[in-house]
């Protein structure tokens, strides 16, 4: 059994633009279900601890037509998270950064998360990030001062499928920031799911539709260990 730390945004409100975001339901619950069915333990953490804000769009009928993730959310499965500042990374074999636009606000430059990522990586664990979740990897620096993904093949949410007008208010473009330091690969957008291993310890996925694939990739990787 492996121990997985799933990291969620606590949420972000932009009152000026009437914009409220957080973590994305499918990106937590789909891989969590796959990991738990395989016997692994998933703990949750967020910058503020407690109950983090979900992006309500992710549990709307458009993105969750069967209500699968809404039901899991309303069951309280994600109501309790540890504070990132209080996490002992040596307790975990995997860190999984959950996407949703909230990750770009309170996770991207979070030094506690960078510490967790580096420690798990140094202990030969797995660093995984979904959709907008790779944002913190950009600013996680290694002892040589380089990003943990510098020069490596990675993926993440591409600009061309961001909601119209959103790039104007987001703090940065995930695709552009990743492409500056890494080998950014959006894959074939006609293909439903896309995940990339940068090395044998770092895996990123492109979008919410890649959430099950991320769970499967992690289970396969953990079986080899």
Image (cartoon, grey):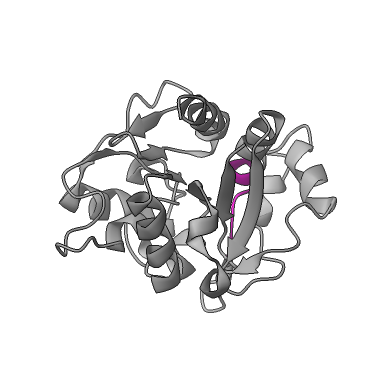
Q: Which residue shows up at 79% across the image and 45% down it? A: 72
The outermost residue toward the top is 191
Tell me the magenta residue range.
21-28
Identify which residue, 171 or 24, lies in the foreground: 24
Residue 170 visible in the displayed image = no
Identify which residue, 193 or 95, lies in the foreground: 95
- Point out residue 148 in the picture as x, y percentages from the top left corner: 26, 53
Q: Is residue 10 left or right of residue 170?
A: right
Q: Is residue 216 left or right of residue 120?
A: right
Q: Which quadrant of the figure contains the N terminus?
A: top right
Q: Is residue 212 left or right of residue 134?
A: right
Q: Is residue 2 left or right of residue 138?
A: right
Q: Which residue shows up at 48% across the image and 28% down it? A: 217
Image: 67 above or below 116: above
- Point out residue 24 in the picture as x, y percentages from the top left corner: 60, 50
Identify which residue, 36 or 208, lies in the foreground: 36
- Point out residue 212 in the picture as x, y percentages from the top left corner: 58, 30
Say if the magenta span includes residue 27: yes
The outermost residue toward the bottom is 16
- Point out residue 187 in the picture as x, y percentages from the top left corner: 32, 28
In which quarter of the view is residue 37 placed?
top right
Q: How many marks?
A: 0
Q: Which residue shows up at 45% across the image and 24% down it? A: 224
């Amino acid at each position: 059994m492996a121990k997985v730390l799933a990291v969620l945004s606590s949420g972000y409100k932009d009152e000026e633009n009437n914009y409220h975001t957080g973590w994305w339901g499918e990106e937590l619950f789909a891989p969590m279900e796959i990991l738990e069915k395989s016997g692994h333990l998933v703990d949750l953490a967020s910058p503020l601890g407690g109950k983090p804000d979900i992006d309500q769009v992710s549990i709307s009928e458009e993105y969750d037509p069967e209500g699968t993730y809404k039901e899991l959310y309303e069951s309280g499965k994600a109501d309790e998270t540890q504070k990132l500042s209080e996490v002992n990374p040596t307790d975990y074999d995997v860190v999984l950064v959950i996407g949703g636009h909230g990750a770009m606000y309170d996770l991207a430059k979070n030094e506690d998360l960078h510490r967790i990522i580096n420690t798990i990586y140094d202990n030969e664990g797995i660093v995984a990030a979904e959709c907008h979740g790779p944002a913190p990897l950009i600013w996680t620096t290694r002892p040589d001062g380089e990003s943990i993904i510098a020069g490596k093949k990675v993926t993440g949410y591409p600009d061309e499928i961001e909601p119209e007008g959103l790039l104007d208010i987001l703090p940065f473009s995930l695709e552009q920031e990743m492409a500056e330091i890494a080998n950014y690969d959006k894959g074939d957008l006609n293909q439903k799911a896309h995940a990339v291993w940068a090395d044998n310890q770092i895996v990123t996925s492109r979008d919410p539709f890649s959430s099950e694939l991320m769970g499967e990739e992690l289970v396969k990787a953990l079986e080899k260990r």
